Image (cartoon, grey):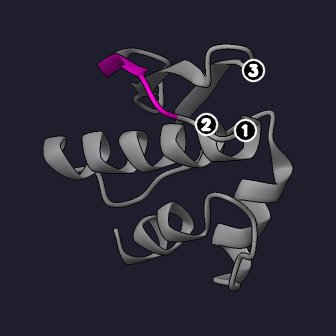
Amino acid sequence: MVNVDTGFDENGGCGSVGSIIRDYSGGVLAAAHSFVPHLVDAPMAEAYALQEELMLAQHIGCNRLIIQSDYMDVIQIMKDRDFSTNSAAAIDDDCNII
């Protein structure tokens, strides 16, 4: 199970992302966080968080994931493998590739 969350500072145009990967029993397999210095808006922060999480999962060899996020637009784009026209379009495309 993957838990992803972000923080976005609208005035500063920056944010932070955090993620945790857990196994079937709830044990932590990996966790990561990072500061993102340049963000346009909250959807871009959420997409960046998902991208970071997918890369972490790939790095530790996870290939079957259940993703939990509080931003449904990002999850729906990934589920439908749909084209995005928001500020995070390039990140969304990267997430689909990962």
Q: Position of residue 76 (x, y in %)?
A: 78, 66
Q: Are marks 2 and 1 in contact (CB under 8 Å)?
A: yes
The residue depicted at 42 percent of the width and 24 percent of the height is 37
The residue depicted at 82 percent of the width and 57 percent of the height is 73
Instruction: State how far apart marks 2 and 3 are (Cα).
Output: 11 Å
The residue depicted at 61 percent of the width and 25 percent of the height is 13
Instruction: State how far apart marks 2 and 1 are (Cα).
Output: 7 Å
Residue under label 3? 10
Viewer-proximal residue among 36 and 62: 36
Q: Which residues are magenta?
A: 30-38
Query: Element at badge 3?
Result: loop
Tag shown at residue 45:
2
Query: Element at badge 2?
Result: helix
Q: Are marks 3 and 1 in contact (CB under 8 Å)?
A: yes
Q: Amino acid at mark 2?
A: Ala
Residue under label 1? 41
Q: Amino acid at mark 3?
A: Glu
